[in-house]
Amino acid sequence: MFYNLCQEESCKSSLFNILTNSSVPAENYPFCTIDPSEARVEVPDERFDWLLRLYQSKKITPAHLTVVDIAGLVRGASTGAGLGNAFLSNVASVDAIYHLVRAFENENITHVENTVNPVRDLEIIQNELRIKDEEMLERHLVELEKVAKFPDAKKIAGVVSKKEELAIVKRVAEFMEKGNDVRKGAWTPSEVNVINSLHLLTAKPMIYLCNISEDDYVHLDENEWIPEINQWVDENNKGDLVIPVSVSLESKLVEMSKEEADAYLRENQIQSQLPKIILSGYKALDLIHYFTCGPQELRAWTVRNTTKAPQAAGVIHTDFERGFISADIMKYNDLRQLGSEAAVKASGKYLQKGKDYVMEDGDIVHFKFNVTNKK
């Protein structure tokens, strides 16, 4: 699940509407969006489109990404300003964040800080998220210090003790005190498990979306803020993705027919950024998908990267995992090159994999399983 975060109400909700084809209010004033809006957006995949043409499936289910739109954060949100506490609680419930920042001038669109300065806005939001995390860690440390004095009643294999958890949380707090976001730390698997249980805001993957004017998008090198935004991200959260986007352009494109939109993009030698934004969000969550194909249904099944075959089968039905026998695998590129399942089998590229097989993005799968009811 992804959260769309920004200080600008109209731009943020407009982008949400474009991504999800919904109709959330996108008024030009703070806190227009009070209750979170949630929608699913289809993950663009040329492979899915080609498989549909091959199998002529009657029913299709592509991969989806869930996106949540809530009211924009403002300076002081961590202390309750602008209904900030409620909104920050909504952020804590998602898996990753799109941070949309305004980088264009328009006197008809208000800015909560009265002037346009995306670097300042990035710092405000980052500070609010960090302050909230630090407050939560402080409270959690107080609680852990009380219970860590006593031995755990029952030690469970693979689960850290309260004393070990206290040490981990202290390390996280010390890391944040140095001005770091939690997601930038090099954590061990046991530390990651503890961090995940805390739902820290700065632990979530972040993608920065720079909202610029249509004219600046056509002439990207002319926007004065893009280099400064890239520099800020490089200095503060190195490795996080920055994507320039023009919400006004994307709004215009969705009002056109496909033919008109394609012609407009060709004429201006540009591309819509929506596919990149969606795919980047999907990858930031470390998600992949495999396909089940046939004349009745073509479906993309979403799993975490490094998922093994039995667990991937369990996404379809728990019986598939419980009674897993094997997975018959075709690689998409092999099927695309050879043109049919029969040709893939004839070439010896139709693979039978067992329980230790790690699923790969784009695998075309038929699972074999057998479940017997115990009497």
Image (cartoon, rainbow, N blue to C red):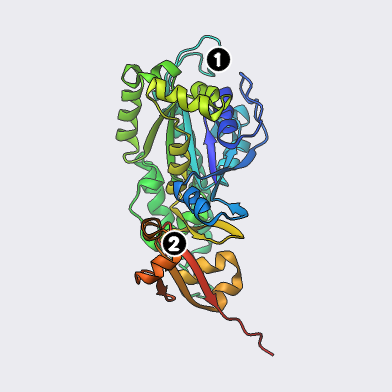
Residue 358 visible in the shown view: no
Mark number for residue 340?
A: 2
The residue that appears at 46% across and 13% down in the rendered structure is 105
Give the residue type at disc 1.
Answer: Thr
Q: Is residue 114 above or below residue 251?
A: above
Residue at disc 1, secondary structure: loop
- Taking depth in this image into account, of 188 and 11 the one nearest to the observer is 11
Instruction: Decide which of tag 1 and tag 2 comes sooner along the chain.
Output: 1
Whole-percent x, y for residue 353 in the image: 41, 74
Mark number for residue 110?
A: 1
Quarter occupied by residue 20? top right
Residue 57 visible in the shown view: yes
Q: Residue furthest bottom?
A: 375
Quarter occupied by residue 206? top left
The residue that appears at 50% across and 59% down in the rendered structure is 291
Nearer the viewer's eye, disc 1 or disc 2? 2
- Taking depth in this image into account, of 99 and 221 the one nearest to the observer is 221
